[in-house]
Amino acid sequence: MADPRGANAASGRDLPGRGVHPAESDEGSRQAGILAILHLFHLADGEYLHSEKYELKTRDWDRTGNIKDYVGRLNRLRRANPALLQTGNLRFVAVDDDQVMGFVKESASRDNAVAVAIALSGARPREFWLHFGDLEIGRDGARTRVAAVENLVTGERHAIAWGGVRLNINPTEDPALLLRCLAR
């Protein structure tokens, strides 16, 4: 029986290995590109044109409730702790409260480790257990378990017992705890 597609039809074995895409000269391909551009113009002409998201605003940085000082403090802590200056070496740690997230970051040289606990809900103060388990910090060849943590804002220290530490966080005052991890 003859192939109904004709004598010049390609078999399934003749398709390119990288996928099946319309040819550049294909009319449908050009129309799809034009439609995409028209869609962008439609967005710029419609709801996004006067969107608050794209407006330049003058801010009163000294107004009550402004977070200028908070952001400044976070930036100073970041500069003082190389672990907070990068996105690598991030390990999540267990927390016994589903409204708090915890993780530990280590610097590339592994000479600085910071544990972070973030309140996901600002509804009320939270007391939680931050569990370090078998997590080790320090340079290669000298890695040890976390022995204590030091609050980077207050300087308060907490010894690690039973593989973790009980902490309090009040999201209305500060939604995050930043704790330097201290080795044994």
Image (cartoon, rainbow, N blue to C red):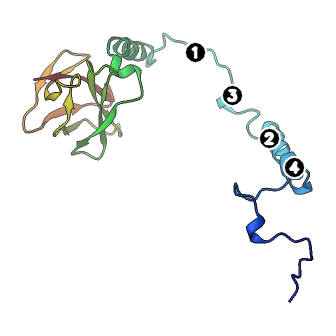
Image coordinates for residue 166, horizontal then vertical, percent = 14, 35
Residue 29 horizontal side relative to residue 99, left or right = right
Q: CA distance from mark 4 to mark 3?
A: 35 Å
The residue carrying pointer 1 sits among few (fewer than 14), some (14 to 19) or many (20 or more) residues within 10 Å by Cα, namely few
Picture residue at 81% right of the left edge, 46% below the top: 36
Check if mark 3's residue and mark 2's residue have beta carbons within 8 Å. Answer: no
Picture residue at 25% right of the left edge, 35% below the top: 125
Q: CA distance from mark 3 to mark 2?
A: 15 Å
Picture residue at 11% right of the left edge, 38% below the top: 163
Going from N to C along the chain, the mark reached first, 3 or 2, is 2
Going from N to C along the chain, the mark reached first, 1 or 2, is 2
Q: Which residue is mark 1?
A: 59
**Depth check: 20 or 73 in front?**
20
Going from N to C along the chain, the mark reached first, 4 or 1, is 4
Image coordinates for residue 182, horizontal then vertical, percent = 16, 21
Picture residue at 24% right of the left edge, 45% below the top: 97
Going from N to C along the chain, the mark reached first, 3 or 1, is 3
Relative to 26, is 184 above or below? above
Image disc number at residue 40 = 2
Q: Secondary structure at mark 1?
A: loop
> How many numbered marks appear?
4
Q: Secondary structure at mark 4?
A: loop
Q: Secondary structure at mark 2?
A: helix
Image disc number at residue 24 = 4
Residue 98 horizontal side relative to residue 155, left or right = right
Image coordinates for residue 149, horizontal then vertical, percent = 17, 24
Q: Which residue is mark 3?
A: 54
